[in-house]
Image (cartoon, grey):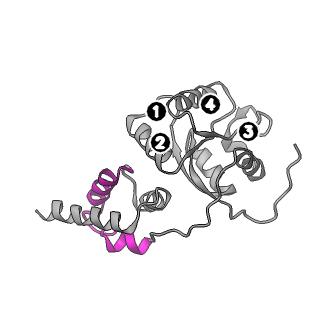
């Protein structure tokens, strides 16, 4: 398949959560599209990661985008077994190869975009609800107790722990609404103040 070259960064925003193997895959995807990813960190997927994938699957839908190698296909099979309605994005080994290394992280943005289009990824035109200002006002960054507050918030909302930047991405990726966020912050204030 011939891929058209794109001159400027694509502003394509993907609504579903994309499940990848690692950090380098996330970076490659973000060079191509605006998206939220969950990293499995290989075959030994932790319980917290399974829980986050389940939340994404139930609330947003997921696209499994693993390396076109044996381990990547095994990870894909394990995730597919638990989440049978997940979408799948695939790269050919040729499109994912750099030297002797094969992986999503090696693909150019045009091949990644084409793979997501073939997977029928939903495009989103929604603006992000939460900003850095919201994170600061809720004392989730910049305060001595911010880390503890983020841990509590992640637990209450079921989105797991993250630093301020990743927490902001999760809030917007999982469509947490303002009322749910404010209720969780109120619970945290009551827990910490008492």
Toward the right, the furthest residue is: 2
SS for callout 2: helix
First of labels 3, 2 by sequence position: 2
Compare residues 72 and 186 and report the one nearer the observer.
186
SS for callout 3: loop
User: Is 133 displayed left or right of 121 in the figure?
Assistant: left
Magenta segment boundaries in residue numbering: 132-159
Point 51% across, 38% down: residue: 40
Q: Main secondary structure of the magenta part?
A: helix
First of labels 3, 4 by sequence position: 4
Q: Which residue is mark 3?
A: 91
Compare residues 92 and 147 and report the one nearer the observer.
92
Task: Nearest to the eye among marks 3 and 2: give it.
Answer: 2
In the figure, 8 relative to 83: above or below?
A: below
Q: Which mark is residue 188?
A: none
> How far across and down, in percent of the image, does residue 26 sit?
59, 49
Point 86% across, 55% down: residue: 4
Compare residues 130 and 39 and report the one nearer the observer.
130
Toward the left, the furthest residue is: 194
Point 14% across, 65% down: residue: 193
First of labels 2, 1 by sequence position: 1
In the figure, 170 relative to 85: above or below?
A: below
> How far across and down, in percent of the image, does residue 61 sit?
54, 47
Contact, CB < 8 Å: mark 2 with mark 1?
yes
Point 87% across, 42% down: residue: 1
């Amino acid at each position: 398949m011939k891929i058209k070259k794109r001159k400027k960064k694509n502003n394509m925003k993907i609504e579903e959560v994309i499940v990848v193997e690692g950090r380098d895959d996330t970076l490659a995807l973000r060079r191509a599209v605006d998206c939220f990813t969950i990293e499995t960190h290989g075959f030994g997927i932790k319980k917290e990661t399974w829980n986050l994938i389940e939340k994404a699957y139930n609330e947003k839908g997921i696209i499994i985008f693993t390396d076109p190698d044996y381990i990547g296909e095994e990870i894909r099979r394990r995730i597919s077994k638990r989440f049978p309605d997940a979408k799948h994005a695939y790269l050919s080994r040729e499109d994912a190869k750099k030297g002797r290394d094969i992986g999503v992280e090696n693909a150019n943005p045009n091949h990644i975009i084409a793979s997501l289009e073939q997977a029928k990824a939903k495009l989103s035109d929604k603006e992000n609800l939460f900003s850095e200002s919201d994170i600061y006002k809720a004392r989730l960054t910049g305060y001595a107790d911010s880390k503890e507050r983020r841990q509590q918030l992640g637990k209450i909302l079921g989105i797991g722990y993250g630093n301020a930047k990743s927490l902001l991405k999760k809030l917007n990726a999982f469509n947490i609404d303002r009322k749910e966020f404010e209720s969780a912050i109120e619970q945290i204030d009551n827990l910490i103040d008492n």
